[in-house]
Image: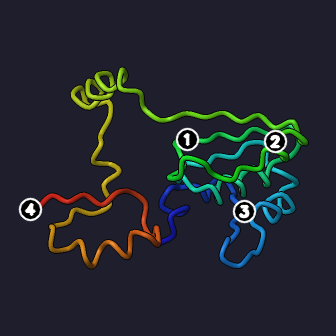
Amino acid sequence: MLWWQVAGCLKFGPVVLDASTVGDVGTAVFDLVGGAHVSVECLGSAVTAANSVYSLRPLGRHVQIGLFPAATADFPIARVIRDELEVLGVHGLSASRIPQVLAMVADGRLDPTAVVHQRLSLGDIPTALPAMGRFAAPGVSLVTQF
């Protein structure tokens, strides 16, 4: 089963674009839908962020969640200015909000186990780690046996 099926997105009629079959992902998305209104990048990839920006229509909005690994990264600022794009950024959960999140877990409003895809032992890691880079399943892998 594919991740977008697991996430239940098919009921919304998504258009699937396999990035491995396209040379210029941003332009392909733009051409496919006439430019996206909103794009989101949360992998921390400068390439994905650039593709995201290039997929936007004029006056579109890009949301950047988290930082790139490098202190500086190529970002298509000329495109942002030319098309009058809005770029919003968020680092992630601020430390001051952690008590609220933990309270939600404690009273049952938030179930962190819902995002766990698999539970591993330390011995499972050499086999499981290469598969994680393929993003074949939604959720996180959690080491529970030491």
Residue at 68% over, 66% down: 16
Cα separation, mark 3 vs mark 2, equals 25 Å
Tag 3: residue type? Val
Q: Which residue is mark 4?
A: 146
Upstream in the sequence, badge 1 or badge 4? 1
Q: Name the front one of labels 3 and 2.
A: 2
Q: Nearer the viewer, residue 6 or 83?
A: 83
> In this image, 12 relative to 99: left or right?
right
Q: Are marks 1 and 2 in contact (CB under 8 Å)?
A: no
Q: Are marks 2 and 4 in contact (CB under 8 Å)?
A: no
Upstream in the sequence, badge 3 or badge 4? 3
Upstream in the sequence, badge 1 or badge 3? 3
Please rate how many residues cluster around mark 3, counting C-alpha atoms within 10 Å: few if below 14, some from 14 to 19, many from 20. few
Q: Name the front one of labels 1 and 3.
A: 1
Picture coordinates of residue 145, whole percent (x, y): 11, 62
Tag 2: residue type? Val
Q: Which residue is mark 1?
A: 65
Q: Which mark is residue 17?
A: none
Upstream in the sequence, badge 3 or badge 2? 3
Q: Which residue is mark 3?
A: 15
Tag 4: residue type? Phe
